[in-house]
Image (cartoon, rainbow, N blue to C red):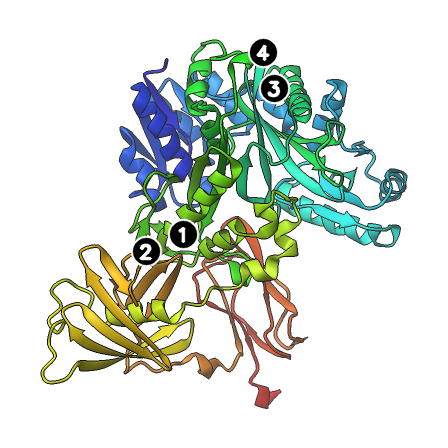
């Protein structure tokens, strides 16, 4: 076993690796950017080395700096985590050339799976089923159109170097093929520097089921499957193991195929073989097809750990240090069911727009595994993925585990940034999901209901009103002051732009009556906590600065308006297009004097690894373009101004 390793990553995966290293007595060297100087993974490590400024290219993607840090600190090996350099074969070779061990597969194995078309040909040769399609080198549009017709519509155009849904288009008939091909190639070239595509048969009721594999460079085993069908924008949201409805025959067939895939490339370490499954007639052993192989540890690996009892990071360390596979296939068994929900800082009603902000409060329920790289007081920045935590639960059955997931989400408390918390709670209660009737289109089919913002009930508003007045504190000065009649106070709050007016009457020590319009609630507090109309409240509300947060299943944030403040938003009269978050201006599509229509794309902003189109709110004429492509802007920065309507 190694005595000291360096983790070439950040956030929750760095923290996750540190936890196993501590248990094994392995010292850890962390690396960090200037934005992460006070990050959780830095605080937990034995040593930490500054890499450079926040942009990944100048910090976490600078392989030379990372290798130099490992050498300077006496680390014997480098764990890449996932993302960043984890699947970069040139980095793997540089690590070996420096006399260090890369905790992961060989550069050759990574290259073998790096391009989707070459990987599919390799898998066909290894006897792994692949989706019918064209993976050839001839990229002539006419030839590709002929191949699509031969495969049979609908088809899927995919970038060979793609990922995350970029460079991907569904085509339902020959009439739309050429336009879709041009769009996919342009997007692939911009995202990956490679516009080559492949064409596959589109699976009508697709499920995304992947198999966890582990190899030692010669032999491999599988640790069963995970279902990752709940996705939005081709990004996973909730994962589970095992897959609902999985049969013994299909599990054996998928596991054997995944092992053949791993052994065909001499795979060492943890990896995932992803399959697309045609579930139009249920799960059948002849209806799964190789999609791609991720040559690294996956974000969703905790659900596999939960149902197998295996610490995959420990296995990575042991095999990289030269030990044989820790277990044979017949020694591995499934136990129970597990779910993982990904909690992100993102604005779901606004199209899952990534968000920033300082986490003023963050708490998870007891007896729940919460893998997180942030703490209360930490800031979600625009530089990296906005994940807050992964919430993992286990149960003896799927129903038991799902009930635990709903309870865990309901008891999770997060404030300081908009999140997908309410979305996750609705998804965990979705009727199709509860029944196990999952496919990759489930979220899109129910998107309107799932993405609707929750509205606080009058009971939650009552708690907010009492907290805003400071009456919820144990030694609040007016708590028991009644004179000859109850003391009554009025408080105004703001919730999502809506004024909340409440009258709070103090009836006795920690005993209140709150009136909101026609709703009246009796509110009490004792040693066990709050009660409203006799029913217990699940969590205490919190006042932080000028905000009040009530955690009642969902997290509701109220602000206490400054009575002297005056709104200025109306002054712009819809003329100014502002940056919704910090980011880099990728492109500007208009110039002064151009006439635009409502909804026209004016500019594109890149933030948190995603591109966001900024559109005109109304018809008008462009008066000024205030930024140039490549500019780094802060949230609220004016980018484009339209002429006043009266002047047009």
Spatial CA distance of label 1 from label 3 is: 45 Å
Where disc 2 sits, the SS reads loop
Mark 3–mark 2 Cα distance, whole angstroms, equals: 53 Å
Using the image, tell me which numbered label, if any, was put on residue 219. Answer: 4
Name the residue carrying label 1: 410
CB atoms at circles 2 and 1 under 8 Å apart?
yes
Q: Residue furthest front?
A: 534
Instruction: Pick the residue in front: 646 or 356.
Output: 356
Q: CA distance from mark 4 to mark 2?
A: 50 Å
Q: Residue at x 60, y 58 (%)?
A: 447
* Nearer-N-terminus badge (1/3): 3
108 on left or right of 531: right
Secondary structure at numbered mark 1? helix
Q: Is residue 197 above or below residue 266?
A: below
- Label number found at residue 108: 3
**Label 2: how many Cα within 10 Å (few below 14, some 14–19, many 20+):** some
Res. 164 image quadrant = top right
Q: Nearer the viewer, residue 351 or 5?
A: 351
Between 510 and 608, the one lying in front of the other is 510
The mark found on residue 538 in the picture is 2
Disc 4 crowd, CA 10 A, few/some/many (<14, 14-19, 20+):
some
Give the residue displayed 39% in from the left and 58% down from the top: 417
């Amino acid at each position: 076993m190694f005595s000291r390793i360096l983790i070439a990553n950040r956030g929750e995966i760095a923290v996750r690796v540190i936890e196993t290293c501590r248990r094994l007595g392995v010292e850890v060297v962390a690396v960090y950017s200037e934005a992460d100087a006070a990050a959780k993974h830095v605080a937990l490590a034995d040593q930490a080395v500054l890499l450079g400024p926040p942009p990944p290219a100048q910090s976490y993607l600078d392989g030379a700096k990372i290798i130099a840090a490992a050498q300077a600190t006496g680390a014997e090996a480098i764990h890449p985590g996932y993302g960043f350099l984890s699947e970069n074969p040139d980095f793997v070779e540089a690590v070996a050339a420096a006399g260090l061990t890369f905790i992961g597969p060989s550069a050759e194995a990574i290259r073998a799976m790096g391009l989707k078309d070459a990987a599919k040909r390799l898998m066909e040769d290894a006897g792994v089923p692949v989706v019918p399609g064209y993976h050839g080198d001839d990229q002539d549009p006419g030839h590709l159109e002929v191949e699509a017709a031969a495969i049979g519509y609908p088809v899927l155009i995919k970038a060979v170097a793609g990922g995350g849904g970029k460079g991907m288009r569904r085509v339902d008939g020959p009439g739309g093929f050429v336009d879709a091909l041009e769009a996919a190639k342009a997007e692939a070239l911009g995202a990956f520097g490679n516009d080559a595509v492949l064409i596959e048969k589109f699976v009508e009721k697709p499920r995304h089921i992947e198999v966890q594999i582990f190899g030692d460079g010669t032999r491999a085993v599988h640790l069963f499957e995970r279902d990752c069908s709940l996705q939005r924008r081709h990004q996973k949201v909730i994962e589970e193991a095992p897959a609902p409805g999985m049969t013994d025959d299909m599990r054996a067939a998928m596991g054997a195929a995944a092992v053949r895939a791993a052994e065909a490339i001499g795979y060492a370490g943890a990896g995932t073989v992803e399959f697309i499954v045609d579930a139009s007639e249920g799960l059948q052993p002849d209806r799964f097809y190789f999609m791609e192989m991720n040559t690294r540890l996956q974000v969703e690996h905790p659900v596999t750990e939960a149902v197998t009892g295996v610490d995959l990071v420990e296995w990575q360390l042991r095999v990289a240090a030269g030990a044989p596979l820790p277990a044979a296939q017949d020694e591995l068994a499934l136990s129970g069911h597990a779910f993982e929900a990904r909690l992100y800082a993102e604005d779901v009603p606004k199209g899952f727009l990534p968000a920033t902000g300082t986490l003023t409060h963050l708490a998870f329920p007891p007896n729940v595994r919460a893998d997180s790289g942030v703490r209360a007081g930490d800031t979600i920045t625009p530089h990296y993925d906005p994940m807050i935590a992964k919430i993992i639960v286990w149960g003896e059955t799927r129903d038991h585990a799902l009930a635990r997931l709903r309870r865990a989400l309901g008891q999770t408390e997060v404030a300081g940034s908009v999140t997908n918390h309410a979305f996750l709670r609705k998804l965990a209660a979705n009727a199709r999901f509860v029944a196990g009737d999952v496919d990759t289109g489930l979220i899109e089919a129910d998107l309107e209901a799932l993405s609707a913002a929750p509205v606080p009930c009058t009971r939650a508003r009552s708690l907010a009103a009492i907290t805003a007045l400071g009456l919820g504190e144990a030694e609040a000065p007016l708590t028991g002051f009644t004179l000859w009649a109850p003391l009554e106070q009025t408080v105004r709050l703001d919730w999502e732009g809506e004024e909340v007016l409440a009258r709070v009457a103090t009836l006795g020590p920690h005993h209140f009556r709150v009136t909101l319009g026609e709703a009246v609630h009796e509110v009490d507090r004792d040693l066990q906590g709050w009660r409203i109309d006799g029913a217990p409240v699940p969590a205490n509300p919190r006042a932080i600065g000028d905000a009040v947060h009530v955690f009642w299943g969902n997290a509701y944030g109220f602000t206490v308006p400054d009575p002297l403040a005056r709104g200025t938003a109306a002054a712009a009269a819809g003329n100014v297009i502002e940056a919704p978050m910090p980011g880099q201006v990728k492109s500007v599509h208009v110039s002064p004097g151009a006439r635009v229509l409502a909804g026209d794309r004016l500019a594109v902003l890149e933030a948190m690894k995603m591109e966001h189109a900024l559109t005109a709110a109304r018809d008008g004429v462009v008066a000024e373009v205030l930024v140039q492509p490549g500019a780094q802007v802060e949230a609220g920065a004016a980018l484009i101004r339209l002429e006043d309507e009266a002047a047009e």
